Image (cartoon, rainbow, N blue to C red):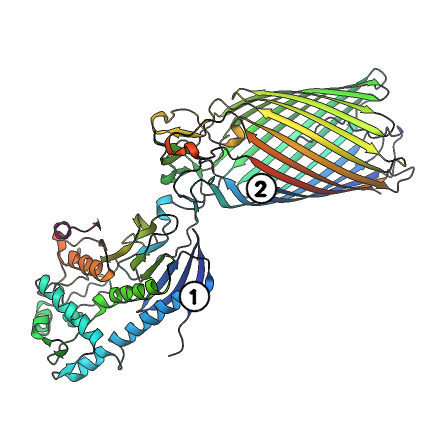
Amino acid sequence: MTAPAMTIERRDGGLMAACFTAMASPCEVLVASSDEPLVRELGSLAAQEAWRIERKYSRYRDDSVIAAIQRAAGRQIELDAESAGLIEFAAQCFEISDGLFDITSGVLRRAWKFDGSDRVPSAETVRALLPLVGFDKLRWQSPYLTVPPGMELDLGGIGKEYAVDRAHDLLHGRSAVPFLVNFGGDLRADRAAPHGAWQIGVERPDSEREAIMILQLERGALTTSGDSRRFLLREGRRYGHILDPRTGWPVVGAPRSVTVAGSSCTEAGLLSTLALLHGAEARAFLEEQGVRYWVVD
Amino acid sequence: MSAASVRADDSSADPALPDPDPQRLVDSSLSYYHENGRIMAVEPVVNLSADFGNDETLGINVTFDSLSGSTPNGAIPSTKPQTFATPSGHNLSGVPQTYTTPSGTLGTVTSPIYTTLPGQLPMDPNYQDQRLSISSSYQKPLSRLMRVTMGGDVSYEHDFLSTSVNGALARDYNDKNTTLSVAGNAEFDLVHPIGGSPVPLSDYTLFDKVGNHTKHDLNLIFGLTQVMARRWLSSANLSVDRFSGYLNDPYKIISVVDSGGNVTGYLYENRPNNRTRASAFWENRFGLSRTMIGVSLRYMADDWGIRSDTAQLRLRWWNSDHNKYVEPQLRWYKQTQANFYTPWLTSMTVPSTFASADERLGAFHALTWGLKYAFQYGGDADVGPSELSVRAEYYTQVADNRLPGPGVLQGLDLYPGLQAILCQVEWKFGY
């Protein structure tokens, strides 16, 4: 793989941005500095970390940990500390969400292709996949993991947020200038921007590159989950891409998008995803959590 | 400026014979203007005129301006950072630094916003404009004592189109020692601001903007030039302007502050749709053997409540060969504020009628120091001497009538002055 590109841009408000692509998403590190070598260094640190995590947990690479787990095909394997930490986190998420948050739900994508068409799968097709879904069907005794044959793990739901937190911690230790890490819309700011809070646009669900509101973030993380442009439409009914792992069917009545503020990106990402999985109950769920949130219906 | 200004130059009287080979004069200049920390402008001007003799002249003027830099947006300094959108932005609340998205995309953050640091005067740093103006005038004698001048002007900027026509009639009396003139100018402007014209007094963050506007100016000048003595020329004029239409500055806003001095928002300004202005001007020139003294006074009053006084003194010293001179000048200016001028609004006093925080409508006084050096060469019986000159001016403007800001604004300088320099090279030659 050739060294992927990173570009440095000058932004308004005395900011510079290091931009690159990782995990199939545009990524940027905003730095409140005009010191280009420093911005390049911080951007490079963040990019290397994002690419490392992408390589390690990609479903599409033969040399990833995920590939190794799939290859084990029912045999127990021992995970390295970082991977074990992520699986342990996923286990906790599964538990506290009563099975709503499930890293094994990816197999449902075999039935559901959210391409804007009307190809809603049959009930039988979905039902046939359900035996392959359920974190409780795994055998997990950290660091030993056994994944039954046919089941799949997908860390896509937590990998990006985890990468943001990792990059944040790395940059925090390297420099004292205010910065913000944003990987594909999941972001975390360290220290307030020099001219006050960071101005974060919440993307209008139906229109890319347009903000529906501006949030002020001094520090901490913001993530947004939504079913913006991925859906099926059949007989006037919209099937959003948020699937309930317990039924195999899209959640009903979910908001268009949910934005949650948290101290870490992993925490905020979990809550914004879970809120969507609660469908029409998203607001009630968020109220219970006692976090700052913004919902777009 | 009206191309129909009365000729009160100390140009020599030409022999009153029609000349088949007209005398052509080129007057070209290049100016550099710089306001301290603000706008910078470069302006080349070419003025071609042909003198057919017997007071028949044709002139064409081409002026190009290029301006760039920072321009105050009308808001006052604050104790907190202030963020604004440039006029082309869609919405102040739509110009984030980055985006949180469910789609995995990141909005392209090219939104033009700017942030002003605490205590600093809010200025749009991206101001840029070019102006091209072409005007012409034709003067022709109607009789031995009477001249008529006709002209027109077209001026184009990316957000402004101006056209005007003018005419003047001048008649000599008293053995050409007295000249009376009357001149009129009609101007029609089309204003199409970048991003649209804001709805007056609307909330700045809403970016509530509508289309284009027009404005008109009718101007009438009555002039009198009198040779008082062999070396004393006196001229006076009375001028009346009637402006109507869209007279707002579409890019100017007003800060709204609470009683504690915290900025709670901004409104777009609103000026009346009409303005009538009258001014009186009187100039005297005294020519001594190697010295010229020019003293002028101007008084202006308009129905917006602005009164202004201008006094100017010019001295010109020639060398003994009478081909070089230095010309120092001093100009003093003072104006009162428009009655709807308000540097800020308080949340309690948001107006229902007119308000502007444009410092040009506030009370201030200004002083201009200038020095010109010129040297002349060539010239013969047919063609006058050519002249090359350099000029420098220094301008300072200080706000009057300063009110202390409420609450936390008390310690801030809410009336930053203005300093500017002008440098100009001018070359006039005939052929």
**Residue type indicated by callout 1:** Arg
A143 relative position to B135: left or right = left
Q: Look at the picture and state if B37 lies above or below A175.
A: above
Which of the 4 image quarters holds residue A121? bottom left
SS label for mark 1: helix
Residue at position x 40%, y 63% from top?
Answer: A18
| Camera-side residue of A243 and A231 | A243
| Camera-side residue of A174 and B155 | A174
Residue of label 2: B36
Please state the chain letter of the residue tagged with numbered disc 2 in the rendered image: B
Q: Is residue B209 magenta?
A: no
Which of the 4 image quarters holds residue B269? top left
Residue B104 appears in the figure? yes
Q: Look at the picture and state if B135 lies above or below A42.
A: above
| Camera-side residue of A115 and B105 | B105
Q: Position of residue B196 (x, y in %)?
A: 45, 40
- Does the CB distance between marks 1 and 2 fall below 8 Å? no
Which of the 4 image quarters holds residue B384? top right
Q: Which region shows up in magenta?
A: A283-296
A172 relative position to A8: left or right = left
